Image: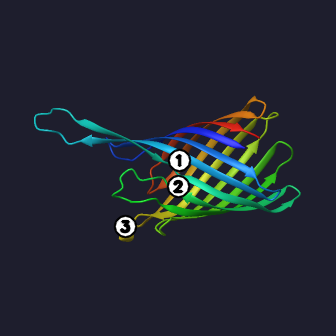
Amino acid sequence: MILSSFSHHQFDLGFAGFEYSKLESAVYAEYGLTDRFTLYGRLSRETRIHVAPAPRQAGETRDHTVRTVSSALGESELGVRTRLISSGRWTVSAQAGAVRFATEPNPLLKPGTRWGLDSRLLIGRSLGQAQFIEAQLARRLGGEGEDGETRLDLSWGVRPAERWLILAQSYSAWGEGGWGAYRTAYESHRIHLSVIAPVTEGLSLQLGAINSVSSDRIAPETAYMISLWREF
């Protein structure tokens, strides 16, 4: 399966005159190596837009803003998933992957490429022919040991018709960020609603929206995305 996506993300910084958003294009792919092992990978690129108030010059009577646009590789990943248990309606899997974190546009803040590790346990259960639920518990470590994050992703899928899928998902994260004495704990909870509809044989279209429902020490996010799913 190959999933190509494009998304727009808007972040509420909580300060008048300051804005931050990003555009992300990404490709995600899965390939079954054997009946139990699956290779997966993700490659993305981001364009980030920063808006900030500009210092008022002598003689100016109104405020101005500075708009900065930068592009760089986004968060990318490569790993392997293995099925541990498959019994009746239950499936339990585990996966581990190397993560290349998004490149910082200002190299003075975090110079060089940062790598990390994402490991997770996946538990899924079918609810008859038309529904399923899944939980993913993950631990993500920063490439330099600076950041540690625990994640819990929940999904509920409903198939109202053949090749149609309605997804309700939640993404929760608890972690730390910053350097040295400036490390702070943060928490984020987001909801993702989307619909996947058939286009042609083996090709589907996904439309979705993401919104923060709760966040602490991290900017709330609103995002819209469109994806193409290609099965092979």
Q: CA distance from mark 1 to mark 2?
A: 7 Å
- On the image, numbered disc 3 is attached to which residue? 182
Q: In the image, what residue occupies the spot 79% across and 38% down?
A: 159
Q: CA distance from mark 2 to mark 3?
A: 19 Å
Mark 2 residue element: strand
For this orientation, the residue located farthest to the front is 33
Coloration mode: rainbow
Q: Nearer the viewer, mark 2 or mark 3?
A: 3
Left or right of 122 in this view: 126:
right
Q: In the image, what residue occupies the spot 35% across and 52% down?
A: 106
Q: Amino acid at mark 2?
A: Ser
Q: Are marks 1 and 3 in contact (CB under 8 Å)?
A: no
Q: Are marks 1 and 2 in contact (CB under 8 Å)?
A: yes
Q: Amino acid at mark 3?
A: Tyr
In the image, residue 207 above or below residue 48:
above
Front residue of 76/160: it is 76
